[in-house]
Image (cartoon, rainbow, N blue to C red):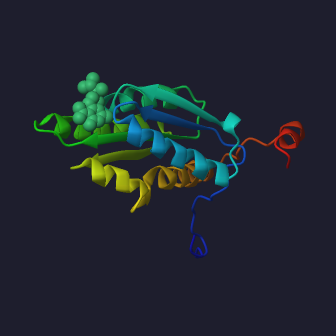
Amino acid sequence: MADKSPGELRGSLSATGLRFGIVVSRFNSFITERLLAGAQEALSQAGAAASQIEIVRVPGSFELPIAAKKMGASGKYDAIVCLGCIIRGDTSHYDYVCSESARGIQLAQLDTGVPMIFCVLTCDTLEQAIDRAGAKSGNKGFDAGLAAVEMATLARKLAGTKPRQETRKRAKRRGR
Ligand code: INI
């Protein structure tokens, strides 16, 4: 991240002491599983152990908001990553699923106060989705994982609370 000016508040990329939820749509799982792998990689690079991450699966992107909202309301997570892939078909179904998943996820984070990362690919073709799930245009799941760490740490700072201290026992188990 670029240098920050005095008095500026921003998140960090350290996942120490934080908990993350990832909610994944099974629809177009060929793509969403790649997004999931990207998000997990980003969280791991930020220092999160598998025990700090919980994964929840839902049928399609339309169901992401309700799961994300319930996860947010549980108080168990510092940030939640929402992963889906919507590919345009012959009817207007695509538009409803896109707008409701985006709207629902935004409402869920505003209602619960838990940062939720919108990583729902909205593509005209499968090729566009493949490009964004680890091919030509990188892996948007990875970007979402980093955004989750940044927003989780920023939310802690804004609330004036510190991440949970890592116990010596847990640190030892993780080989730190
Ligand atoms: N769900 C998606 O995540 N992606 C899609 O491309 C998609 N299409 O094309 O239909 C899709 N539909 C299912 C939807 O999300 C719900 O699961 C379903 O309508 C049941 O509520």
**Which quadrant of the picture is home to ligand 1?**
top left
Q: Residue at x 74, y 41 (%)?
A: 164
Q: Residue at x 41, y 26 (%)?
A: 58
Q: Residue at x 46, y 45 (%)?
A: 35
User: Which quadrant of the figure has residue 95?
Assistant: top left
Q: Is residue 83 visible?
A: no
User: Which quadrant of the figure has residue 96?
Assistant: top left
Q: Is residue 150 visible?
A: yes
What is the x, y in percent for residue 114? Answer: 50, 39
User: Which quadrant of the figure has residue 45?
Assistant: bottom right
Closer to the camera in the image, 154 or 102: 102
Q: Could you tell whether 32 is left or right of 91 in the image?
A: right
Q: Residue at x 19, y 38 (%)?
A: 94
Quarter occupied by the N terminus? bottom right
What is the x, y in percent for residue 140? Answer: 43, 53
What is the x, y in percent for residue 119? Answer: 40, 46
Q: Could you tell whether 60 is left or right of 109 in the image?
A: left
Number of marks: 0
What is the x, y in percent for residue 174? Answer: 81, 43
**Residue lying farthest left?**
91
Closer to the camera in the image, 132 or 54: 132
